[in-house]
């Protein structure tokens, strides 16, 4: 049974099937959250709800896939690859098709997180911060692979590609990023208040 589940949901095809199967549930959750926020008068109810569900819906299946155990899980010690670009060179030597799949897959792992996190959280409305977030999440996954002895290679190249995917996705969503200017009307963006204005306000 474990092998069967691994064979189905441990592949790109399996992830796609799982994602499609859960799409109606994700849409329903977005609708429920948005309705509740609109009833409460929350600005940007649909955008916030879509971003929250998108982060989970677009990230969990990929993380699940890369944390599935290999055929020798538990029987072999964790393997590390800490030389940047070493693994990429090796997979290109095995053929461009495999290299393309590996690169695209790693770019997509935290792409949804990179796309939606700055849409949801003003504090993450920065490519640098999204890159750091993607790298941090990737390091946690690689450490888990190593510590749990999942018969996978914990590679610095995976971290680089995961972070790059998050950063590129963040650039794609830049026009929808949440900023302090999204605060309710009457509260100006802090950057829009001049130093003189702040001094005047402080004397009041």
Image: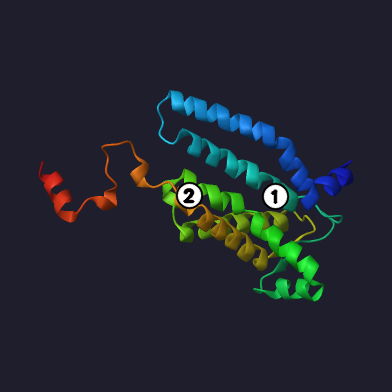
**Quarter occupied by residue 18:** top right
Question: SS of the residue at dot 1?
Answer: helix
| Residue occupying image coordinates x 64% and y 46% | 58
Q: Residues within 10 Å of mark 2 (few under 14, many from 20)?
A: many
Q: Residues within 10 Å of mark 1 (few under 14, many from 20)?
A: many
Query: Closest to the observer: 44 or 91?
Result: 44
Q: Which residue in the protein does label 1 denote?
A: 62
| Residue occupying image coordinates x 74% and y 50% | 65
Depicted 106 relative to depicted 49: above or below: below
What is the C-alpha distance between the residues marked 2 and 1? 20 Å
**Quarter occupied by residue 19:** top right
Answer left or right for 172 relative to 25.
left
Depicted 67 relative to depicted 45: above or below: below
Q: Which residue in the protein does label 2 denote?
A: 118
| Residue occupying image coordinates x 78% and y 61% | 77
How far across and how far down the image is residue 193, in percent? Answer: 22, 50
Q: Quadrant of the C terminus?
A: top left
For the question of whether residue 10 can be seen, the reply is: no
**Quarter occupied by residue 121:** top left
């Amino acid at each position: 049974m474990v092998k069967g589940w691994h064979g189905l949901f441990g592949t790109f095809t399996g992830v796609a099937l799982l994602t499609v199967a859960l799409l109606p549930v994700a849409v329903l959750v977005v609708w429920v959250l948005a309705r509740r926020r609109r009833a409460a008068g929350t600005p940007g109810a649909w955008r916030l709800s879509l971003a929250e569900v998108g982060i989970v819906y677009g990230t969990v299946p990929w993380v699940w896939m890369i944390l599935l155990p290999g055929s020798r899980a538990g029987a072999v010690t964790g393997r590390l690859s800490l030389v940047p670009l070493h693994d990429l060179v090796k997979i290109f030597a095995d053929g461009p098709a495999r290299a393309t799949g590996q690169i695209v897959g790693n770019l997509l792992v935290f792409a949804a997180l990179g796309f939606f996190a700055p849409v949801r959280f003003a504090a993450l409305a920065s490519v640098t911060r999204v890159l750091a977030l993607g790298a941090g999440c990737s390091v946690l996954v690689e450490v888990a692979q190593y510590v749990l002895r999942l018969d996978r290679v914990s590679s610095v190249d995976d971290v680089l590609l995961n972070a790059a995917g998050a950063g590129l996705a963040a650039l794609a969503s830049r026009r929808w990023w949440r900023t302090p200017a999204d605060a309710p009307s009457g509260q100006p963006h802090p950057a829009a208040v001049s130093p003189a204005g702040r001094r005047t306000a402080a004397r009041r």
